[in-house]
Amino acid sequence: MATTFLEQTRGLHEELERLERVIVKDYKEQEAKTHREKLLQNHRVRKRIDEMQEVARKLVRVYTDGTDESRHRKEEIKALGADNPTAVYGKFYDRLKELREYHGRFAGLDITGPEDDSHLLAEEPKLDFSGEEALGRYLDLHDLHRAFTNAKFGRQCDYLDYCGSLTDFSEIARHLKLGKPYRQYLSSLLAYLTSFYERTQPLSQLSRQLDKLRDEVAAAFDAGQLPGWEDKGVGGPGGDAEAAAAQLSSDLESFESVDELESMGAEQLKDKLAQLGLKCGGTVRQRAERLYALKGKSLAELDAKLFAPGKAVAAVKSEAELLQQQQAALAAAQLEAQVSRLGELLANVISDTRGRVEKKQAQTYEELVAELEEGEAEALGEEEEEEDEYVYNPLKLPLGWDGKPIPYWLYKLHGLNQEFKCEICGNYSYWGRRAFERHFKEWRHVNGMKALGIPNNKDFFEVTQIEDALSLWRNIQERNTGGFNPEQDEELEDDSGNVYSRKVYDDLKRQGLL
């Protein structure tokens, strides 16, 4: 019954308390055991908290002076007779009459029964995850990986390397970071990581952390204290280039023309131009003309067209260009900082994703099909994977098919306590003789041998050191390239039984010694 504004306000307070009780019941009565159940529970609680915030916002407007809700509340309190004590009883009986009429119209309404929140506790929110994400266990970065490898600022790398260097922006050139495509890529990456984190951690307050981080980055950027952006993104070749330009300007006084400067050669001209931040492409003549333009001048006096992208000094740029470049640099720095923070928060998920990729690369076709069928069965509710329970395993024995440690005698029988390291595989450890022998045909060792330029055949079986493999490969090459040399390899015997090579025998015979 909400016929008055005060009654509506009381109902809001009651709704707030009811939602709190529902959250408590959810945690006490609904014990979440599996990963999926925990996700559903957290999303249910998140929904209840959102409803509580909406109710709280309405109550804040009611008690905030100057709002329409606050004015209605004061008018209704005043209408109850608070200012006129003699009218209190009349107002009371009028309200009592309204209550009797209301319950007379709705005689079957029972407000004394217990609360029934079972439908809220049984609610299953929609979990919006792709198949690759596996209910939030792994990241799905395939689209972003494709965008990175096809972009000018990116590089060609496989999906595993991309996941490992997701938050490493040190290899990207400065002028590429100031471009719009780079910021668009970072925005897409940030949007995905934010969405993934909010879907897997619905009770977190990520937006507040990112807003605070954005303000901190902006303050450090304005103060010139942000690592990598001390120049506030205005570019320029740097202090070393300024000193080199001053020295080179004086050295150019000894050259009378561009023709004389051409005698330095294309490579030396290119190195000088790159050191100064100038364009270093074109013919030898064009490079010499570009460098000769520095004669008797400083970098600030040169034409901005002579500089490479992002290398022009601030003095040759207009104020509008400097402001635009600073804004682009600040946006890129903020996006990089936010992505790095999310990378820290999702460090375990990124590590699990890399492990899953490595596992899939080593799986056979039959194993991939079996895993896909298990995932489909879980999605359909036919099979629900139980959360891994704590297993007492002080000896750190490998787990068997049932998820329990294998017997210790079996562990010793297979030699799983023996560690074999392979330097060619990046000092990767293999436990047990069987795993060590099998790894010579697996992808990790094959890629390592391919990187060394050595064929992976039986000649290199059980060779794990890089130096040993290279030495053996050189010996094999020398043996294969060697031919038969009659003068050195053919042997002859004299009448006394002395054995000589063909060359020595012929020399002695010509001298009449035989």
Image (cartoon, helix red, strand yellow):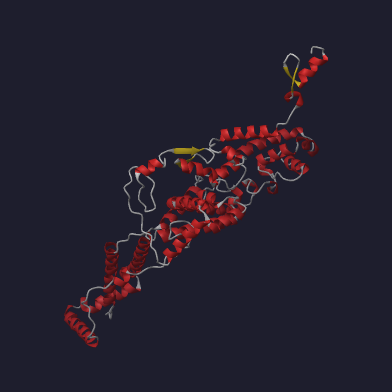
Q: Is residue 14 left or right of residue 359?
A: left
Q: Whole-percent x and y of residue 251? A: 72, 33
Residue 404 appears in view: yes
Location of the C terminus by quadrant is: top right
Q: Is residue 224 above or below residue 3?
A: above
Q: Whole-percent x and y of residue 239? A: 60, 39
Judged from this view, the residue extending furthest toward the top is: 513
Q: Is residue 331 above or below residue 496?
A: below
The number of discs equals 0
Residue 187 appears in view: no
Toward which corner of the image does residue 441 lie, by quadrant?
A: top right
Q: Is residue 380 left or right of residue 451?
A: left
Toward which corner of the image does residue 252 lie, by quadrant?
A: top right
Q: Is residue 255 above or below residue 366?
A: above
Q: Whole-percent x and y of residue 430? A: 46, 41
Toward which corner of the image does residue 327 lie, by quadrant?
A: bottom right
Location of the N terminus by quadrant is: bottom left
Q: Nearer the viewer, residue 375 or 144?
A: 375
Q: Nearer the viewer, residue 410 or 199?
A: 410
Q: Whole-percent x and y of residue 221? A: 50, 48
Q: Is residue 454 left or right of residue 291?
A: left
